[in-house]
Image (spheres, helix red, strand yellow):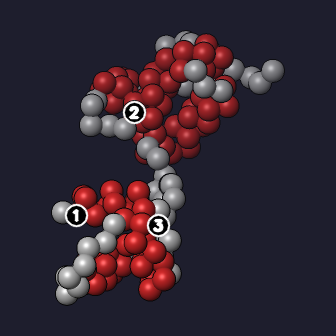
Amino acid sequence: MPAPIRIVLTEEEDRTLLELRVAASVPYRTRDRAHMLWLNAQGWTVPAIAEIFDCHEHTVRATIRRWQADGLGGLWEASGRGAKRKWSEADMQHLEKCLEPELRTYNSFQLALKLSQERNVKLSPDRLRHMLQKRA
């Protein structure tokens, strides 16, 4: 069984974590991390905090270690997370340029095929339709 981890907060850190916990403009994971840290500082154990947040104990311990290493900056997600997009703005401009002079209309399946053949960019018709709707 791992040794208990406990953090001690200053009054300013305590106030900051409480404000982050309820801030609507902060991502929910950051709010959860702030709440985990605050609970730990109040004397809650790692297993109890993990049960409250329905996560693994390693997640809570990692949050505490990130706080100890990076302070407040450790609460936010690292940059570069998630999948990178497969298309560029030039690909969308190419599609728009192709559509302007032609008299025919295309559906999303045909546009996805055209993009795949001409620019070697593979997007699903649903994704392409969604992106074009956002641009319109």
Residue 114 lies, in percent from the top left, at: 42, 79
Residue highlighted by disc 2 = 28
Amino acid on which disc 1 is placed: Arg
**In the rendered image, which quarter contains the N terminus?**
top right
Mark-to-mark CA distance, 2 and 1: 28 Å
What residue sits 42% from the left and 36% below the top? 30
Name above or below for residue 94 compared with residue 21: below
Residue highlighted by disc 3 = 123
**Image quadrant where residue 27 sits:** top left
| Residue 47 visible in this rendered orientation of the protein | yes
Residue highlighted by disc 1 = 135
Which-is-in-front pick, marks 2 and 3? 3
What residue sits 53% from the left and 21% below the top? 53
**In the rendered image, which quarter contains the C terminus?**
bottom left
Question: Quick one: label 2 or label 3, which is nearer the N terminus?
Answer: 2
Amino acid on which disc 2 is placed: Tyr
Name above or below for residue 62 compared with residue 43: below
